[in-house]
Amino acid sequence: MASTDLMRLWRLHQIDAGLIEVRQRAAQLNSGKAQQERLAELEAEAEKHPYRILHAEKTDLELANKTVEDKIKKFETQLYGGTVVNSREVANLEKEIESLKRQRDKGDERLVAILDQLPPLEASHKAISDKLEEGKRAVASARKAAVAMKGELETRYKTLSTERPEAAKIVPPALLGKYEGVRKARGTGMAMVVNRQTCGGCGTALPERIRESAEAGRTVACETCQRILYYTEGLV
């Protein structure tokens, strides 16, 4: 059975392992970056889609035709309302109205052509739009989950960081110094004896004398990774 000092050191090791785990999980938080990159690709695809281009042209033509129609009405009001009586001005207005009507008719022809082309393209455009909406929801969900997990990890990290000084204080200085040296070199300073045979840190098969020392509760280290070994039969 492990000595009291080793039990205390093991508690410190568990805190340090917890801090490492928190940092690793924080580094792996999914903020939706992959989904955002895919969204950017889909948005670019949607922007270049013929349906989107034709639909934008349709909107522009409708606005342009409305402007032309308004001008035609304005000039016809002037022409037939008696506000313009000069023959030259009348002739100019008639020419302008005819020109505007040709422009309107040309716009109408293009609109008809666009309206014929849009329906076959709508399904593929809708598929991309649906993927975009699905992607936006995925990004929002990932961000929400990441924010929640970040809060949990920060709380856990603060708790462990607060507990560590007290846990280290009750470990004998010499043992603590050895542990800290190995921890800096290996990332962790202790390892459990697994199945009474191997080092839980590096997986090396332990010599019998090392196993016996660990089982007897003496301070002993793995000869391969130098981690201090901890043996327990379920009593941590």
Image: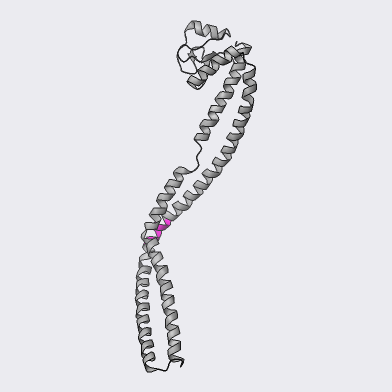
Choose between 137 and 100: the one closer to the eye.
100
Q: How far from the left and from the top, in percent, is residue 209?
A: 50, 5
x 41%, y 75%: residue? 65
Image vertical order of residue 84 relative to residue 175, above or below: below
User: Is residue 224 among the parts visible in the rendering?
Assistant: yes
x 40%, y 58%: residue? 123
Q: Quadrant of the C terminus?
A: top right
By secondary structure, the bulk of the magenta-drawn segment is best described as helix
Q: Quadrant of residue 84?
A: bottom left
Choose between 127 and 28: the one closer to the eye.
28
Q: How far from the left and from the top, in percent, is residue 94?
A: 37, 88
Image vertical order of residue 143 relative to residue 171, above or below: below
Choose between 88 and 11: the one closer to the eye.
88
Q: How far from the left and from the top, in percent, is residue 56?
A: 41, 65
The verdict on residue 124 being magenta is yes
Image vertical order of residue 31 relative to residue 53, above or below: above
Q: Quadrant of the N terminus?
A: top right
Q: How far from the left and from the top, in percent, is residue 185?
A: 48, 20
The verdict on residue 111 being magenta is no
**Magenta span:** 121-126
x 52%, y 47%: residue? 140
Choose between 152 and 226: the one closer to the eye.
226
Q: Quadrant of residue 55?
A: bottom left
Color style of the picture: one colour
Query: How many numbered marks have been drawn onto this rendered protein structure?
Result: 0
x 38%, y 54%: residue? 45
Image vertical order of residue 1 relative to residue 165, above or below: above
User: Is residue 235 among the parts visible in the rendering?
Assistant: no
